[in-house]
Image: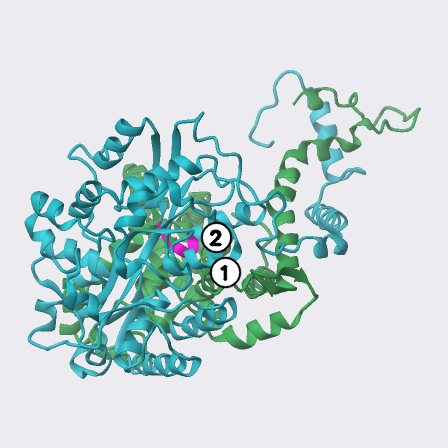
Chain colours: A green, B cyan
Amino acid sequence: MSTLTEAPPPLTPAAPAKKPPRRRGRWTPYWLLLPGLLWLVVFFALPMIYQASTSVQTGSLEQGYKVTWHFATYWNALGDYWPQALRSVLYAAAATVLCLLLGYPLAYLIAFRAGRWRNLIMILVIAPFFTSFLIRTLAWKTILADGGPVVGALNTLHVLDVTDWLGWTAGDRVLATPLAVVCGLTYNFLPFMILPLYTSLERIDGRLHEAAGDLYAKPSTTFRKVTFPLSMPGVVSGTLLTFIPASGDYVNAELLGSTDTRMIGNVIQTQFLRVLDYPTAAALSFILMAAILLMVTFYIRRSGTEDLV
Amino acid sequence: MEQYEPDDRLSPAQVAAMRRSLRTGRAALTRRSLLRASAGGALALGGLGSLSACGIPAAGKTAGGTSAEDHSAQEKRISFSNWTEYMDVDDSGKHHPTLDAFTQRTGIKVTYTEDINDNNEFFGKIKPQLAAGQDTGRDLIVLTDWLAARLIRLGWVQKLDPANLPHAFANLSGQFRTPDWDPGRAYSYPWQGISTVIAFNKKALDGVEVRSVSDLLDNPELKGRVGFLTEMRDTVGMTLLDLGKDPAAFTADDYDAAIARLQKGVDSGQIRRFTGNDYTSDLTKGDLAACLAWAGDVVQLKADSPDVDFIVPDSGYLTSSDNLLIPNKARHKTNAERLIDYYYEPQAAAELAAYINYVCPVDGVKPYLAKIDPDAANNPLIIPDKAMQAKSHAFRSLSAKEETAFEAKFAKLTGA
């Protein structure tokens, strides 16, 4: 803040500008940004350049890798792994929609109806984050175990027959199927949906609801015309915070899925660590990033909000 | 700034000026201009030229040679990286009795770290240092055959001095003496042997008999309840044996045939999933009725859940080993060699074997082990008898090209 206190003397509109405005303050905002920018350069820009370089290299571990501008890696990677890429988008989208359907009522409840329980419920939402991501995902293996009560109940109710027909599960089990992976994704990213929704909803002035009531709006109309539009920033940022990490996730597919549920994150991991095909892994990472960037840009444009939260 | 009341050092006018300057002045910082500025900066900084500058240097051609100056005499210590649960532990859970005995006898302090959890991940971790010819900070590491072979091929590990390894040379069991990737054990000594067998859960099988890999792949009653391993050599090796091929001398066509056989199991939904070590929980819960498994795990699982057992197929089983290696530039090479030699003394080897239940690579251990744990001494999974040794097969080492091609095919099989 010391830089700030040395800011130029106040420029009052009334004072005639006798000398050209002092330019000392011109760089101040950039100096303030410097730590952040440095961080960005060292931990984002440089790795990105390195990764971009890797993606156009060819070679092997023995011979070393050289940049040969081999852009075909991108087309080959897309040609080989488009099913996993498409699957990632589908699973992440499904998980995001489920998160929204589950998270909105809960966030609404916390914001408007919870009263003195509000803090307790918030803690309950965040509490699972005190254990590791891995443990939380592994817990689902116990919950959805073949002989467990959940799968037993679903079987008795013939729910699994329907999901099997839809291709979401296989036989009379849930684990190692697409449904299990989407469940895991939904569960793991739910708080990222609830928190922004809650902040958005909590800001809505209660008097607006009263006003809507005074104007003879039914509760459903109030929700449709007042609450939901005002919570849009929360919806948009919540869906982004859920969709982006979910589409790159590989832990859920690894632990809860099978061979036909592998996502793009799994492919990148395998290519990088197992096959040692660093260029393909780097190219796939870029493709994933580009795809997410495109989708997110389109989504933000369409949703017509630039203010997130 | 809206909610924050500026303190008395800033007059309201100053704040207003600051805001103006940030929002509308020459230095106006809109999101767009910032993005433009940082993108431009990144491009200017990186430039296309630097893209080509950051290739990965060829392996094995590191400047400055492979060995560092040996500090063993001055610094009586060694840093030892191993897999989790691969060392004896006393009841308090804090001390490793065999390591303590080593320190007591030699005065060499051992920093024992369990930081290896997966061969591929660990390779990713140490690769940058080794490729750049730097010290990894580790004097002794334990890696499975194929990765040990790769490090030797890349020239990233140091040749051992036989003069420091009298016990190891004398007592190494014949089964492990001449792997094709390190004939005569010039660079490596086995820490423990690993047998790949078929494990099953009696309750989950419910009377279905499993005797071979074919049963796993073909029996319709096991559909969706069969697991294979993500370790390519174990899964493909056992399938090759089942097809009547020798994993020590197979061709690329044989490999493709084994992959095709497994692919059928994947397509039909017979194979539930490919697992790492996590098959153990699936097996005890009964989600997997039968699967490929590592015998050392099964011995431990059996102790906890009586339903779990294993069989050795008639076509044979696969044996591999985890090997002690001294990476390039390690500072305490002689100390590390003394530790290797110590674990080839039958008494220390017996204490270790009694605790961790893997295949003991040391000859002459049986009488010592019988004193500690008679059951373990008679367990062919720990001390293989003649019949067991006859069924043991090794997976041949692969050239760099083969390794990439085979791993890529296997990756495709497992879904990516």
State whether residue B237 is above or below residue A254.
Answer: below
Residue B124's label in the rendered image is 2
List x then y, in percent, for residue A131: 31, 43
- The number of numbered badges drawn on the structure is 2
Q: Residue at x 57, y 53 (%)?
A: B60
Mark 2 in CB contact with mark 1 (< 8 angstroms): yes
Q: Amino acid at mark 1?
A: Phe
Q: Residue at x 71, y 53 (%)?
A: B53
Pointer 2 chain: B
Q: Amino acid at mark 2?
A: Gly
Residue A154 visible in the shown view: yes
Residue A114 visible in the shown view: no
List x then y, in percent, for residue A115: 30, 39
Question: Which residue is at the far right?
Answer: A18
Left or right side of B113 for B288: left
Among the 4 quarters of the image, the one containing residue A22: top right
For marks 2 and 1, give the CA distance: 9 Å
Q: Residue at x 56, y 66 (%)?
A: A280
State whether residue B324 is above or below residue B390.
Answer: above
Left or right side of A8 for B97: left
Q: Give the magenta part as a residue range.
A: B117-121
Q: Which residue is mark 1?
A: A272
As for residue B205 lying within the magenta part, the answer is no
List x then y, in percent, for residue B172: 28, 52
Quadrant in which the N terminus of chain B appears: top right
